[in-house]
Image (tube, rainbow, N blue to C red):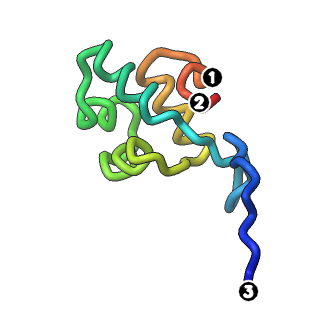
Amino acid sequence: MKMRNTKKRNTQSSIEGGISLRIDRIKLVAELTRQDMTQKRLAELSGVSRTTINYIKSGKSCTDEIGHKIAKALNVPIEQLLEN
């Protein structure tokens, strides 16, 4: 029987070729709403696919590069979007 690791996930961890960020999906949705911006428009402004944005909105992690592109497109510091 395998034991599960029950430690809380860190918001940053190493993944293939870089750092993985966990953007807080509620903070992302709140910022999109505040700016009256659609996922499609965020994709256009950030250069990130709508599929990737939808994954992040569903709670998946992303690379630090993608996280920074999204933050820049929203004109907010990346720290404002990360999980606590």
The crowd level at tag 1 (other Cα within 10 Å; few <14, some 14-19, many 20+) is few
Q: Is residue 77 above or below residue 83?
A: above
Q: CA distance from mark 3 to mark 2?
A: 34 Å
Q: Residue 16: where, in percent of width, then height?
A: 68, 62
Disc sitting over residue 1 in the figure: 3
Q: Is residue 43 left or right of residue 73?
A: left
Q: Is residue 7 left or right of residue 84?
A: right
- Mark 3 crowdedness (10 Å alpha carbons): few <14, some 14-19, many ≥20: few
List x then y, in percent, for residue 35: 30, 14
In front: 1, or 54?
Answer: 1
Q: Which label was assigned to residue 79? A: 1
Kindly identify the amino acid type of the residue bearing the numbered disc 2.
Answer: Leu
Q: Amino acid at mark 1?
A: Glu
Q: How far apart are the two marked residues, 1 and 3, measured between alpha carbons?
A: 39 Å
Percent x, y for residue 27? 45, 25
Total labels: the figure holds: 3
